[in-house]
Image: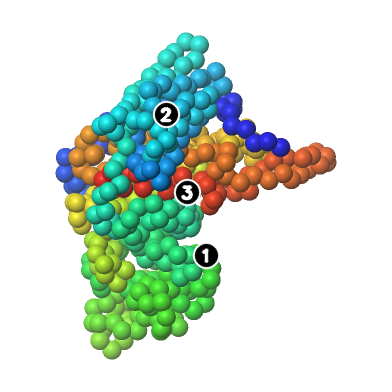
Amino acid sequence: MKLRQRLVTQCAVLLLSTTLFGQITLGATFNPIENQTLTSENLKTDTTVLDYTNLNVEGLLLPKELFILEGTNTTVENYTIFNKNAFLSQFSNYNLSVVSSYGVASEDSWSFKTGSLNEYPLNKRFDLNFYLSNDTTLTEQNVSVELVDTSNTTPVRLLAIGDSLTRAGIYLNQVEKKLPNVKVLGTRVYETDGISAREGRGGWTLNRYFTAINSSELDSPFMFPTTIDGARYKGNTRDWKNICYTDSTNPIYAGFQTIARDWKSKGPYLYDMNGYYKYPLKGDVMVDPSRPKGSEWIEWTGTSWESMAIQPTTFEFSFSKYMERFAAAYTEGAPTHVSILLGANDFGYNNALEDMEGYIRKLNQMIASIKAYDPHIKIILCTPTPAPNTEIVTDSHQAFYNKYDRNMKIATYYLLKTYDNEQSKQQGIYIAPMHLTLDTTNGFDYKETTETIDGATIPVIKASNGIHPNNSYGQLQMGDTLAAVIQKYR
């Protein structure tokens, strides 16, 4: 069956509050966010719920600027914006058209090829005009396009934070291949996949990066007791036991073996069979979840690990302490850039985006913590990627994909509304619009199979993976989009 790309026809309406942006804004300086210190009794998601009654949002999902890597006579860069990814509505009566003196507009997309195959202005800038209309309304937006000079090779050390897409690292590998002198950093590295490193964890939400400490399954690398220095905190014994000995091939724990060896690919681990740090100094601290409640937090006295007399009850997200604790992963220097790609697990499985306000609050908090460590670090917020083309999928998951696609678009809408402005840019915060450039037809893999419905076996087409774009094309598009933003803001 030939795969075709058409506008989504599933109808959906979501009403959103106008109060979000009045409450959540970035200040002129990165001051600590309220309630940055979390107590052990309150390690949970924000309970603030948006009011879905005031504003009917059916707008365009476009940043103010787009960046395309400049090609050469021998290297052509292809950049495509897919129409159905560029606006929020899923109503079939909406039509999007793109008008520009450059590139090629079709019914489904606008595309541009750099290098010798395309003419463009001498200043390497031009405008795209988007027109979204239905029978009664017309919404338009102008987007400035810049072709980015690729001659700048200033070193970039990129720390990528995210979920399973970042853990897989395919789009990060594309960035390293596309741009010279770029290295991806993080505490997670797989010796056989050729990707430098990353800070990705499958299934994780932004909230989990803020709450997982003394947890049952892999603590957040950014969470610390407020009273303990980063270099003094040696982590969760259960984590290190699983990483080093009992569960090292589990996708949850795989990839941390190098940091467990003090950033060596071979040799003994820094932790014993029970997950205890082998070379502690007096005052070093760990948490052992297997100990009785109220005695889990332990301290090295100089001769043994003993329960702390005063057990920690307050915890903080601290990028500075992260850099202290995992200094072995950063011997070549601290990150110059941090990319953040989250949202799929935060919102994809929910009925609606009931905690977008809390999500933005935590994102502000993460940014504030990074900037407190080094205000010069450039932060790139990647928009979450859409679902597979729901016009292709015919199995029983189609309704789920429509919901997922809508939620990713709502998350993108609020990321753009909050951060795509001059104030954020002056503070070194930028948007990588991965949602626009992902081909949901060819960027996912599909397969023909059968499904039994009411006792009848019928042929269906299903997405081979409904959340992750494929490695051969979709994730490469993601990498190209991120690479252009990095090159612009090296």
Q: Which residue is mark 3?
A: 476
Tag 3, which secondary structure?
helix
Q: Nearer the viewer, mark 2 or mark 3?
A: 2
Sequence order check: which comes first, mark 2 or mark 3?
2
Q: Which residue is mark 1?
A: 251
Q: Nearer the viewer, mark 1 or mark 3?
A: 3
Q: CA distance from mark 2 to mark 1?
A: 43 Å
Residue 96, percent from left and from top: 47, 22
The numbered disc on residue 261 is none
Give, as a three-letter code, the residue at label 1.
Pro
Tag 1, which secondary structure?
loop
Quadrant of the rendered image containing residue 149? top left
Q: Are marks 1 and 3 in contact (CB under 8 Å)?
A: no
Q: Is residue 124 visible?
A: yes
Give, as a three-letter code, the residue at label 2.
Gly
Q: CA distance from mark 1 to mark 3?
A: 23 Å
Q: Mark 1: few, some, or many residues within 10 Å (few <14, many ≥20)?
A: few
* Residue for point 19% across, 55% down: 374
Q: Which residue is mark 2?
A: 103
Which residue is nearer to you in this view: 293 or 21?
21
